């Protein structure tokens, strides 16, 4: 299966570090509902009912601040990594008996907070909770919330010897098993954005028994196939990946852009809210695709306090390998080491023909990382044709799926409507 992955791989120097920082902190918002209407702005100048202090709060603190119940859970993967799970339990019994739990999984360098930052009536996690869904937010290994292991410490180089393959092969199955045991459900619904879709399809292809535990999978900008990368800085970075790898190895760097308590203060200085043309916005536009009308400056400020949330260097390199090789396959260790690990000189490709869970794909015309033609090509690789939704807004970009001002009307309302239709039809 020929395909490629677009990523936000970067050099560990000031200008490229800033590039990655703003790649993952692009102002993202959802269309307001309830007490917020199009064109409304609160006293602090935001389109949304949010506060600047939200950038300094953790995922559980955000949920508590806005009046929702919250629980903290952990699942342990078979290889010892401990995965943080944050739950927003339903406040009352759902109208439909047997309603499935919802598992939301973030993208590259992101965290569970990505589904919360825009606040009630806007963020996807809150919209689901308002409708009495049992909402679970996962944090993949290596980010700020999931840096524990049964044997290793996070300052041990061996801890960082993982890519997103292990997330799909170990982390997701452990999280799914835990949620199903805890809730007594036989299946759950899954929503992933970007890398959150990559790890799902690793699991569904490599451990096909888990397809039976998925009611429905909603893929927001699926980062599985991408031959056409339109982002100029990302294209340049991918062309120099082997130089970057040598640099990382020379300096003994295994962890990539870990979360820092200082990052929020720094980005508030570098990228002030009152300047819509600040350096962050300029780099974001070049990276994910320009869409200034759907940008909320306070949302950007808040998001810088949460992302980047950390990743492994190997995780980044794996994305770059797939982009260069054009194949959705396991990590390439080189001919000799591949033979020892895989009994073949090439890493094995993921068997997408094993994916049987029902899938809905949302994709966008102005996504400079996952081109709409590649989303359509990926859909043809799945044995069961997925439902396809091309976002109507022609300017919608890669990160708009998480937090654009019109994400609710363009994407979230469609998901909610589909969930309701499945319930009415008795589809689990």
Image: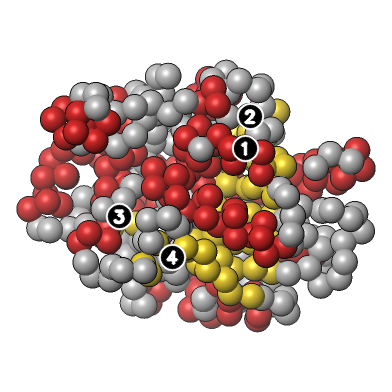
Residues tagged 2 and 1 counted as in contact (Cβ below 8 A): yes
Q: CA distance from mark 4 to mark 3?
A: 15 Å
Question: Which label belongs to residue 356?
Answer: 2
Q: CA distance from mark 2 to mark 1?
A: 6 Å
* Residue labelled with disc 4: 82
Residue 230's image quarter?
top left
Q: CA distance from mark 2 to mark 4?
A: 28 Å
* Residue labelled with disc 1: 211
Say which residue appears at 89% left-offset and 55% top-offset: 97
Of residue 177 and residue 215, the one placed in the foreground of this image is 177
In the visual, does 22 lie left or right of 200?
left
Residue 298 appears in the figure: no
Q: Earlier in the sequence, mark 3 or mark 2?
A: 3
Q: CA distance from mark 4 to mark 1?
A: 23 Å
Say which residue appears at 34% left-offset and 23% top-offset: 326
* Residue labelled with disc 3: 312
Of residue 57 and residue 30, the one placed in the foreground of this image is 57
Depicted 108 relative to depicted 263: above or below: above
**Label 4: which secondary element:** strand
Of residue 346 and residue 110, the one placed in the foreground of this image is 346
Instruction: Please provide percent x and percent y for residue 167.
Output: 43, 49
Q: CA distance from mark 1 to mark 3?
A: 27 Å
Residue mark closest to the camera, 4 vs 3: 4
Depicted 88 relative to depicted 249: above or below: below
Depicted 339 relative to depicted 11: above or below: above
Residue 103's image quarter?
bottom right
**Label 3: which secondary element:** strand
Classify 10 Å Cα crowding around label 2: few (below 14), some (14-19), many (20 and above).
some
């Amino acid at each position: 299966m020929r395909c490629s992955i677009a990523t936000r791989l970067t050099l560990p120097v000031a200008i490229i570090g800033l590039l990655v920082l703003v790649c993952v902190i692009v102002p993202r918002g959802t269309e307001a509902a309830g007490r917020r209407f199009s064109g409304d702005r609160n006293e602090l100048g935001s389109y949304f009912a949010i506060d600047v202090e939200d950038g300094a709060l953790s995922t559980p603190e955000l949920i508590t601040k806005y009046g929702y119940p919250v629980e903290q859970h952990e699942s342990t993967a078979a290889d010892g990594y401990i995965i943080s799970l944050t739950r927003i339990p339903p406040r009352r019994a759902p109208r439909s008996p047997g309603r499935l739990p919802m598992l939301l999984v973030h993208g590259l360098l992101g965290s569970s907070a990505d589904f919360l930052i825009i606040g009630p009536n806007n963020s996807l996690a809150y919209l689901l909770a308002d409708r009495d869904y049992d909402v679970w937010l996962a944090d993949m290994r290596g980010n700020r919330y999931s840096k524990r292991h049964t044997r290793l410490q996070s300052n041990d180089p061996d801890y960082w010897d993982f890519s997103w393959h292990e997330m799909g092969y170990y982390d997701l199955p452990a999280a799914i098993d835990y949620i199903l045991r805890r809730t007594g459900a036989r299946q759950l619904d899954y929503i992933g954005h970007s890398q959150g879709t990559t790890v799902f399809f690793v699991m569904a292809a490599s451990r096909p028994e888990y397809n039976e535990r998925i009611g429905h999978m909603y893929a927001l900008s699926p980062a599985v196939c991408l031959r056409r990368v339109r982002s100029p800085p990302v294209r340049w970075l991918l062309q120099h990946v082997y130089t970057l790898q040598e640099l990382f190895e020379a300096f003994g760097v295994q962890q990539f852009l870990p979360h820092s308590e200082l990052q929020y203060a720094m980005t508030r200085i570098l990228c002030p809210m009152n300047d819509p043309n600040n350096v962050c916005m300029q780099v974001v536009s070049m990276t994910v695709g320009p869409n200034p009308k759907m940008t909320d400056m306070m949302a950007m400020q808040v998001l810088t306090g949460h992302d980047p949330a950390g990743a492994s260097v190997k995780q980044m390199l794996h994305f770059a390998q797939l982009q260069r090789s054009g194949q959705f396959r396991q990590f390439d260790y080189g001919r000799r080491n591949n033979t020892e690990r895989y009994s073949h000189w090439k890493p094995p490709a993921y068997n997408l023909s094993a994916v049987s869970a029902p899938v809905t794909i949302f994709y966008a015309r102005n996504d400079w990382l996952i081109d709409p033609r590649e989303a359509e090509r990926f859909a043809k690789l799945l044995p069961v044709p997925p439902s396809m939704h091309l976002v109507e807004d022609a300017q919608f970009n890669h990160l708009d799926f998480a937090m654009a001002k019109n994400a609710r009307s363009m994407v979230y309302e469609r998901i909610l409507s589909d969930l309701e239709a499945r319930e009415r039809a008795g589809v689990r």
